[in-house]
């Protein structure tokens, strides 16, 4: 329980410090992401992100197909967004705020596990 409270406090502090979110926006984020928040820890996300994009939320692979910290293709991004966060559909993963990229990754992981990341998923 303590770890869970620390994670929530860290998320809130990060959101407030990095984004200047309003308290209402923070509550919305926490409520919206609650169903998948515990799917991957912050450390597991870091390992996946470091492998996929060298921890770069704006990364784009040379072909331009895979984008963002977790190297989503647009079709996968849009599918996950439509099921979990419709307001993120059709946005470029490489330009979406880091906390939403993390949330989308947790949502996809909750559905398919490491399968979308056949190499880097094994490092989680």
Image (cartoon, rainbow, N blue to C red):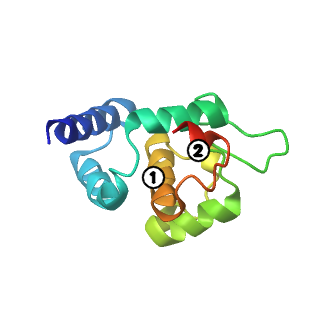
2 and 1 marks in contact (CB < 8 Å):
no
Residue 52 image offset from top left, x and y in percent:
65, 37
Task: Sort mark 1 into few (<14), some (14-19) or many (20+) by Cα contacts within 10 Å.
Answer: many
Q: Residue placed at 27% from the left, 48% from the top?
A: 26
| Mark number, residue 121 | 2
Q: Quadrant of residue 123?
A: top right
Q: Position of residue 16 (x, y in %)?
A: 30, 35
Secondary element at image label 1? helix
> How many numbered marks appear?
2
Residue depth check, mark 2 versus mark 1: number of the one nearer the observer:
2
From the viewer's perspective, is residue 78 above or below residue 122? below
Q: Is residue 109 left or right of residue 16?
A: right
Label drawn at residue 11: none
The crowding category of the residue bearing disc 2, from other C-alpha atoms within 10 Å (few below 14, some 14 to 19, many at least 20), is some
Q: In the displayed structure, does residue 47 sit left or right of residue 94?
A: left
Residue pushed farthest right? 63
Could you tell me which quadrant the N terminus lies in? top left
The relative height of residue 32 versus residue 1 in the rendered view (above or below) is below
Q: Secondary structure at mark 2?
A: helix
Disc 2/disc 1 C-alpha distance (Å) = 12 Å
Q: Nearer the viewer, residue 104 or 114?
A: 114
Closer-to-camera residue (47/77): 47
- Mark before the other along the chain sequence, 2 or 1: 1
Q: Image height check: is 85 above or below 16?
A: below
Q: Residue furthest left?
A: 1
Residue 39 picture location, percent across and down: 38, 52
Mark yes or no: residue 90 visible.
Answer: no
Tag of residue 106: 1
**Residue furthest to the front:** 122
- Residue 44 shows in the view: yes
């Amino acid at each position: 329980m303590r770890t869970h409270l620390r994670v929530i406090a860290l998320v809130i502090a990060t959101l407030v410090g990095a984004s200047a979110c309003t308290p209402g926006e923070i509550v919305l984020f926490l409520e919206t992401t609650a169903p998948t928040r515990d799917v991957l820890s912050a450390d597991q996300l870091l390992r996946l992100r470091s492998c996929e994009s060298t921890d770069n939320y704006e990364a784009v692979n040379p072909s331009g197909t895979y984008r963002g910290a977790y190297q989503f293709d647009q079709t996968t991004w849009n599918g996950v967004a439509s099921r979990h966060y419709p307001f993120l559909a059709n946005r470029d993963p490489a330009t979406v705020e880091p906390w939403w990229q993390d949330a989308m990754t947790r949502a996809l992981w909750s559905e398919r596990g490491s399968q979308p990341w056949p190499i880097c998923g094994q490092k989680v």
